Amino acid sequence: MFFYYLDLAWRSIKKTPFLSLLMVLAISIGIGITITTLNIYKMASINPAGERSSTLFAVQLLSQDVDTWQRINEQITYQDATNLLKSEVPVRQTAMFRTGLAVQTEDENFSPILEGVRVVEGDFFSMFAVPFLHGGTWSKQVDQEGGYKVVISEELNNKALGGGNNIGKTLMLNRKPYQVVGITKTWQPSPKYYDVNNGAFNDSEQIFVPFSLAPIEEFESWGNNNSWRHEDIRNYNDRLNSEMHWLQYWAELSSPAMQQEYQEWLGRYIEQQKALGRFKRPDAKGEISDVATWLTTNNVVPEDNKVLVGLSVLFLIVCLVNMLGLLLAKFLKRAPEVGVRRAIGASRMQIFSQHLVEVGLIGFCGGVFGLLWAWGALSLLASKFDLTESLSQLDQSMWFIAPVIAVSAAIIAGIYPAWRICSTNPSVYLKSQ
Amino acid sequence: MLSMKNISKVFKTDLVETHALRDFNLEVQEGEFVAVTGPSGSGKTTFLNIAGLLEGFTHGDFFLDGVNISNLSDNKSAAIRNEKIGFIFQGFNLIADLNLAENVEVPLRYRGFNAKERKVRVERALEQVGLAARMKHLPTQLSGGQQQRVAIARALAGEPRFLLADEPTGNLDSLMARQVMELLEDINKAGTTIIMVTHDAELARRAQRNIQIVDGQVCDFTMYQGEHGSVAQAASAPGKTAEIISVASAVAS
């Protein structure tokens, strides 16, 4: 019977094209706005770490004195970072920060460009599952002793080195030669969870250099730097020895037992630092947060987004109320035909189903048009309001979600009109038709 | 086949109670052709609606083909309407958007017949009323008489046990009315029980039995002699029956 109802629904829509178009428009605008906000919310709240979410932990230390800011900072100091790197508890770990370097090649035609660079430990790539096109990360020895090695993205490889397997070739960074050891495939986790302080939805860096080079090359910090006390920082060495929080730190802890062990290790580390005159506050502590918790505590998805989704749903409801009125008018006009169908054997449930299928079809059309509205709205936001690409892409799941929401919402709106028409007394209309 | 005992139907509003039927008693045997007459507002249509399970009743007992109709669920009522009852209306009540074949097919859809079975039955029913060649035509492309024949085909397609006809010739000219009536008589001869509400005394005389409803009650009935009894035979009979027939004729005229 479903296909029979579908056929009747299509005939009915064709019979009243203007009214049907009004209903489709009403629901499609509601769906378009809802899907637009839902898409932004979804893209913003994706946990890009996937199954590694529960084994990757951001490490924080509550180290400042009591008479300054009270919250635990998202970043840590260089001296803490180098100390934490000595722990043997994590499977892998990395300190990191963002800097910027001038890129040159041996090709004289290539104009130098200034690129954002991430300074990391060699474990960074396996921890965050960065896919490689060619080569891989640098050796442990480079992490310990320093070495002019670089991992670049496929895009930069194409732009600066002409593409292909350029492992072993040289890239000039701030006029220093770095040997290319790895070329990554396009990698754009969104949100950029490993560093939410520097634009959680910004593009990921295209150049990665060893953390061990930081004190040698004195890489500037291109991120937030938080100091809780005045320090006379005159040179890079002062910065490294300061209490300035400017580094991100991540540890891979593969089991609850390992997490517990690392917490205990952090506790011992804090006691050790207290003995050395640091971490003076009584509640000094170390905290670890898995990726999901990290994204939540850092408000990566602003509350405004949730409010926006709520408002768009309210707008959808207004559209549905309009649709309900139109449906009621359309269905009740059809009461004589329904009377005939009831007389010749249709049950109330069959009439109800027939009309719900029609409503569902209108909802489906509204969903399809709504997707087009959403696609247009996201493109407009991207072009006119500088919405980042990661947020303005229509998520594939929306191709499924939009029609489902549209059909469900339309059916909810159609229940009352369908119930009204199936409840009418057929005998009233049989005589008068 | 149809048995109504002490049926009453009361329509209530805040201020008024209207007794459409009161202590209504009727027995219809299988294969009968019964004409129901009576003045306007006497309860003929209410009786037909109750007999066709389109309306409930307030009191009494109603058995249709041995099934107690009291308190039937909507699904069961619909199934009985679909399988056992065929409706023919004064206004034809064809669905304007559907062609003839699709109109005739509607009750078969609700019955759950497959496409092949539906096709066979639709063709057979339309052949029976002489419209097999116009299956793809829309109702608006037909004359009134043809539309009524399509309505009859729709009623027959499901092979019902009885037909309920509410003034089936009311919107037709005399020639077409006669053709439709002849068709109904043929259907009755084939074994289908027919109950026909009519204002037309001439048509009523062609039925085997004539029931007069006055003020919501069966006032009396006349059983005609032979296959097609005449008014003269009935009116010549002494007593109340003859009077009623005369009243009925007067009202109808």
Image: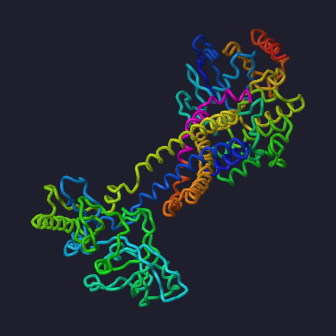
Tell me residue A25's x, y (percent). Answer: 64, 46
Visible residue check, residue B161? no
Front-most of residues A234 and B118: A234
Tell me residue B241's x, y (percent). Answer: 75, 13
Q: In this view, which residue lies farthest toward the left?
A: A275
Q: Is residue B193 magenta?
A: no
**Residue at 57% over, 46% down:** A30
Q: Is residue B202 above or below residue A325?
A: above
Q: Is residue A24 above or below residue A195?
A: above
Image quadrant for the N terminus of chain B?
top right
Front-most of residues A146 and B21: A146
Visible residue check, residue A256? yes
Q: Is residue A253 above or below residue B168?
A: below
Tell me residue A320's x, y (percent). Answer: 57, 40
Q: Is residue A430 magenta?
A: yes
Q: Quadrant of residue B214?
A: top right
Front-most of residues B74 and B244: B74
**Residue at 82% over, 31% down:** B181
Image quadrant for the C terminus of chain B?
top right
- Which residues make up the magenta segment? A408-433
**Residue at 50% over, 56% down:** A39
Whether residue B142 sits left or right of residue A134 in the image: it is right
Front-most of residues A103 and A59: A103
Whether residue B72 sits left or right of residue A24 in the image: it is left
